[in-house]
Image (tube, rainbow, N blue to C red):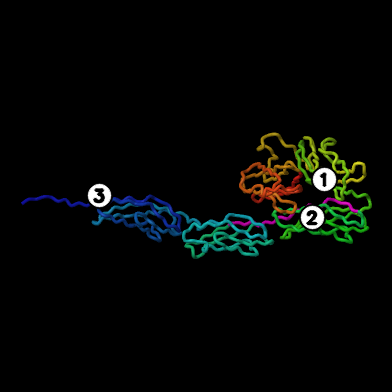
Amino acid sequence: TGYFHVTVYNRPPELTCPEDGNVNAEETFISTDFSVTDPDGDSVTVSFLDINPSATNDPQIVDNHVEWVTTVSELGDYDICLVATDPCGLADTCEFTVTVDEPTGVFECPDDDSVHAGDLFVSTNFTLTHPECDPSSVEILDITPVPTHNPVIVGYHVEWQTTCEEDGDYVITLITNESCSIQDTCSFIVTVYNRPPELTCPDYGHVHPMNLFISTDFYTTDPDGDDVSVSLLGIDPPAEHDPVIVESHVEWQTTCVLGDYIITLVATDPCGLADTCEFMVTVTWDPVPDFYIWVYPITQYVSAGQAVGYLVELNSMFGFAKPCSLYVSGLPDPPDNGVFEQVVMTPTDFTTLNVYTLPQTDTGTYTLTVTGKEIGGLIAHSTQVYLKVLESLDVGEEADNSNTPKNFALFQNQPNPFNPETQISYYLPKGCQVRVTIYNVLGRRVKTLFDGYQSAGMQTLIWNGRSDEGIQLSSGIYFYRLQADDFYQTKKMILMK
C-alpha cells in the first residue's frame, strides 16, 4: 500500500467597484466599469447586493457597469454594494457611493427679447435637455399681462402676434405636459415697444394776400422705421381755405385777410403715436423775401471754453438770385466769438456758423438769431436757434472726466455737411449688438453701415455717401440711426457735392 496527498483548494474572486459618482434626480445614473478577477480562473457572477438607504428602484448590472434610475424623492448619498460569486459560492463584495442632486430643468427657455408693437414676435429656440421630451411636450402655461393674441409654439420656438395695444414687459411661461416623464417650467420676458415719430415743420414763411403759399419741406423720421402719415391738425386763426399736404410740403390759398397764421401738423405712425409741430405764415402786403435761412441743428451743446458749429443754408423760393449778408445776434461773450466762414451767400450756398465760448462763459441757454439780408435791399429773413453752454471740461484722463458718457450716446457726424465722406461716432457703455443704418428723407433705408457685435467704448464709422449697392447717392439730407441693445437714436446729416 501507499499514500499520497491531494490538496483541494478554491480561492475567492476579487471585485473592484466603480468610482463614486453624481446624478441629478429623475435621471439615470450610469457608473464607470467595475472589474473582477479570480485567482483560479473561475467564471464569476457579479450582482447587486444592497443599496443604503433604500431606494425606489434597485440598481441593475448592465455588462460591466451599474445603471440606476433615480426619482425626485431621492436626494443625498447612497451606498451601493455589489457581490462577486464563483461557482463554489465564494464571494467578494465592494461598495461605492452615488450622490443624488436636485433635479435639473427639462428645458431651457428662449432668450429675453423685444418686439415692435404690431409685429410678429419670433423667439430664439428653447432647448430640451431630457431625452424623452420633444417640442410636442412643451405648452404655453401663461403670459402676463394678458395680450390680445396668445403665443403659440412652432417647432422649437415661440411665435406671438403683437398688436398696437401691447406695451411693456410680457412674461411668457412654458411647461412640459404629460408626454414628458417629468414636469418643468421656465419663463422669459418679451418687451413690446413703440416709439412716436419725429416731425420737423417747414420754416417760417411770408405770402401776399390772394396768393398760393408753398412751404419748404417738412421732415419725418420714426425710430422704429414705421411708415408715418402727416396731416393738417389746424390753422389759427381759422382761415377760409384749409392748408393741404402736397408730398412733403404745405400749400395754402390765402385771401385778403392779413396777419400771422399758425399752421399745426401732426405725424402719426400705424399704432397712433404722434408728434406735432407748428410754423407761422405771415400774410402781408409788405415786401416778401423769396429766400429763407435754414440753420441746423436747432439746439447745440457746448462746454465752456470750447467751440461748436451750426450749418447755415440759404434757400430760394421763387428764383431769388441776389447775394445776402449774414448776421448773428445773441451770442455769449460778444463781440468776436461767433464767426461765419463765409459772410456773403447766394441761394443754395452752405456755410458754417462757428460759435466760440470762453472758460468763464456763464452756463445756460442762449437764443441766437441768424439773419440773412439782401445786399443793397431791405428784404431780410431771420430764424432762431439755441446754444446750451455746459460747465467747462476738466483736463485729465477720460476715466476721471465727469463728462465722459455713462450711457449710450450718438454724436453729430463730422464734417457736416460732407463730401466725399463723413465720420459717425457713438459711445457704448458695454459690449452689445450694434446696428447703424442710414435713411433718406423719404424714410427708406439706403445703407447698413454696421450690423454686429462691438465692445464697449467710443466707436467711429466712416460713410462715403454710397448705398448698399455701391451707388453714389445724390446731395441732400440723410438720417443716420444707432440701435444698440434697447437704445435708439437718430440724427440728421447733409451730403453736399
Q: Sequence order check: which comes first, mark 1 or mark 2?
A: 2
**Which label sits on residue 39?**
3
| Quarter holding residue 377 | top right
Looking at the picture, which amino acid does disc 2 mark? Ser
Task: Check if mark 1's residue and mark 2's residue have beta carbons within 8 Å.
Answer: no
Residue 365 can be seen in this image:
no
Q: Is residue 351 above or below residue 56?
A: above
Confirm whether the magenta stretch covers residue 194.
yes
Front of the two marks 3 and 2 = 2
Q: Is residue 239 above or below residue 97?
A: below
Residue at image coords 63%, 49%: 451
Front of the two marks 3 and 1 = 1
Please tell me which residue lies in front, 295 or 71. Answer: 295
Is residue 110 left or right of 311 when viewed as pictured? left
Is residue 174 left or right of 293 when viewed as pictured? left
Q: Secondary structure at mark 1?
A: loop
The C terminus: image quadrant: top right
Is residue 7 left or right of 428 when viewed as pictured? left
Looking at the picture, which amino acid does disc 3 mark? Pro
| Quarter holding residue 398 | top right
Q: Secondary structure at mark 2?
A: loop
**What is the magenta range?**
188-207
Residue beneath label 1, please? 348
Front of the two marks 1 and 2 = 1
Q: Sequence order check: which comes first, mark 3 or mark 1?
A: 3
Image x and y of residue 491, in percent = 73, 48
Please tell me which residue lies in front, 99 or 301. Answer: 301
**Which label sits on residue 248?**
2
